[in-house]
Amino acid sequence: MRSNSKPHEDLVYEISHGSSQEAFASLIAGIADRIEAARLNPVKVSDLVSVLRGGYDQAVQSCDAERLTQMAPPVLRLKILPKPVIKGKMDVRFPGSVTAISPILIDKTGGNFIFSVDINALAAMMATIFQPNELFEQHITNPGPATIGSAIGIVRVDQTVGAAITLNLPPAANKSCPVLIADWKGDAGTNNITITPSGTEKIQGRSSWKIAGDTGSIFLRPIAGIGYVR
């Protein structure tokens, strides 16, 4: 008895069904599978050798007479190829057409790329982002009424028409900074500027506030849920 009959038994079972052509195809496929298993797992090399030495004879003896008359011993030609290994080297060259947009600067002297930052340009670009809300301005030129923005710190009333105007404040809880409201045109004595808070809120205890003098102004600080105080 062979020392390892399990591979033979498995192969016989695989080819014991179907027509003789199917059995032959199963035999070839079974051997191919074992070759693949031996390639992936060196431990199975002994199984492969056992199948190639005796598995076919045992498989044929297990088939019926009709299959034996139509089946021919398979001819196996094995060619072991070395595992291909591809090695490459890439010489990456930095493109000479690289350009930068302020505040990024590039110095390409001698083919070396040196990157730097123009601090003054960066500060100018970021000024509108990092400046306090008190510096955000709202310039009103159209006829009213007009709503003062929540993040606005300065309001210049400078209408192109000579008419009174009403300015509506946002809820104090939504106002992120105090606001200075000024008669920039200089005609508030004739064309009053009326300032109204939101809902039931008050301005210094009043339901509204008027700038009734030329070039007049008022500085209001928000108090959440209450209104504004001078």
Image (cartoon, rainbow, N blue to C red):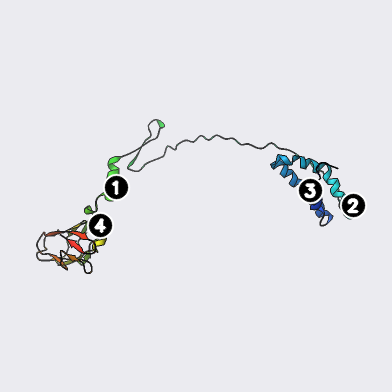
Q: Amino acid at mark 1?
A: Met
Return the residue nearer the eye: 153 or 164.
Answer: 153
Identify the residue at image location x=81%, y=47%.
8
Q: Amino acid at mark 3?
A: Ile
Q: Earlier in the sequence, mark 4 or mark 1?
A: 1
The residue that mark 4 highlights is 176
Q: Amino acid at mark 2?
A: Thr
Residue 31, how many percent across, how many down? 77, 46
Q: Name the secondary structure under disc 2.
A: helix
Label 1 crowd (10 A; few <14 / some 14-19 / many >=20): few
Q: Earlier in the sequence, mark 3 or mark 4?
A: 3
The residue that mark 2 highlights is 69
Q: Are marks 4 and 1 in contact (CB under 8 Å)?
A: no
Q: Earlier in the sequence, mark 1 or mark 3?
A: 3
Return the residue nearer the eye: 96 or 121.
Answer: 121
Q: Earlier in the sequence, mark 2 or mark 4?
A: 2
Q: Are marks 2 and 3 in contact (CB under 8 Å)?
A: no
The residue that mark 3 highlights is 28
Label 3 crowd (10 A; few <14 / some 14-19 / many >=20): some
Q: Earlier in the sequence, mark 2 or mark 3?
A: 3
Is residue 3 placed above or below 228 in the rendered structure? above
Return the residue nearer the eye: 169 or 215.
Answer: 169
